[in-house]
Image: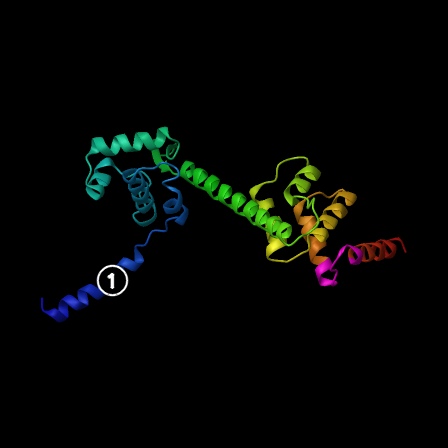
Amino acid sequence: MDNSGWRTWAEGASSGLGAGIAVLPYALFRYYRRLKLQDDELLLLIHLMNFKQVEHKEFPMLEDMMEITGGTTTEISLTLQKLMKDGFLSIDEEFDEESGILYERYNVSGLYDKLSICMANDAKNKAKQAVAQRETALINTSEPEGELNMFSIFEKEFGRPLSPMECEAISGWLDQDKYADELILMALKEAVFAGKIHFRYIDRILLEWSRNRVKNVNDAKAYTQKFRNTGRS
């Protein structure tokens, strides 16, 4: 084959590679060290995902994995056993009554559960750090002492610890939407008054106030009173 022929072959191979792409979660690469996964364990999990997505093999044979990884069947078996023992991997079984065949498939939902916990913990810590930085800034700019911790107030009213998503919501109101602290607390108070203590309702209150140019507590009180009077008439 001449140079032109090889070039054509390479172009065809390049197109073929694009058709055989497996999608891998970024969180796997970000957190696998935190989950104490070894490199060979990570690689085997990636191969299992590749087998499922590209080759449509949900339970590849040890020989298939040996050919790709270069490891022995014993090494691969031990790695699989450790992944299952540590809760990253499991095997699902399904019996086909019509054919009488028992099908098996690898299940990586345990891995995804562990990754989601890492993501949630990071989100919660990030939200708390943002609020802590805001409170520090308020103190440094000589704001009145006794600035109440927003998280603590919400947890007290809700009667439970906040979830990571709820912490992110508070952080978003403060840092992205730029709602004043006093306005957020006023919205919380209104939610408690209405007996609808959940974040979606509080967010609707804040959005409604924002649309009606409610900027502070006095504006909020006036708007709320007007709304209630209208409701009675």
> Where is residue 83 shown, x and y percent of the image?
34, 33
Res 208 → quadrant: bottom right
Res 45 → quadrant: top left
> Where is residue 114 shown, x and y percent of the image?
44, 38
Horizontal side of 127 relative to 25 (left or right) equals: right
Quadrant holding the C terminus: bottom right
Question: What amino acid is at disc 1?
Answer: Ser
Magenta-colored stretch includes residue 210: yes
Above or below for 88 versus 8: above
Residue sticking out furthest to the left: 1
- The residue wearing badge 1 is 14
> Where is residue 221 shown, x and y percent of the image?
81, 54
For this rendering, which residue is in front, 216 or 80?
216
For this rendering, which residue is in front, 73 or 184?
184
Residue depicted at x 19% and y 42%: 67
* Badge 1 element: helix
For this rendering, which residue is in front, 144 or 172?
144
Q: Which residues are magenta?
A: 209-219
> Where is residue 62 shown, x and y percent of the image?
24, 36
Residue depicted at x 40% and y 43%: 31
Magenta-colored stretch includes residue 166: no
Horizontal side of 188 relative to 10 (left or right) equals: right
Task: Categorize mark 1 by other alpha carbons within 10 Å: few (<14), some (14-19), many (20+).
Answer: few
Residue depicted at x 75% and y 43%: 192
Give the total of numbered labels. Answer: 1
Horizontal side of 165 relative to 199 (left or right) equals: left
Q: Can the viewer see residue 169?
A: no
Q: Can the viewer see residue 176?
A: yes
Residue sticking out furthest to the bottom: 4
Quadrant holding the N terminus: bottom left
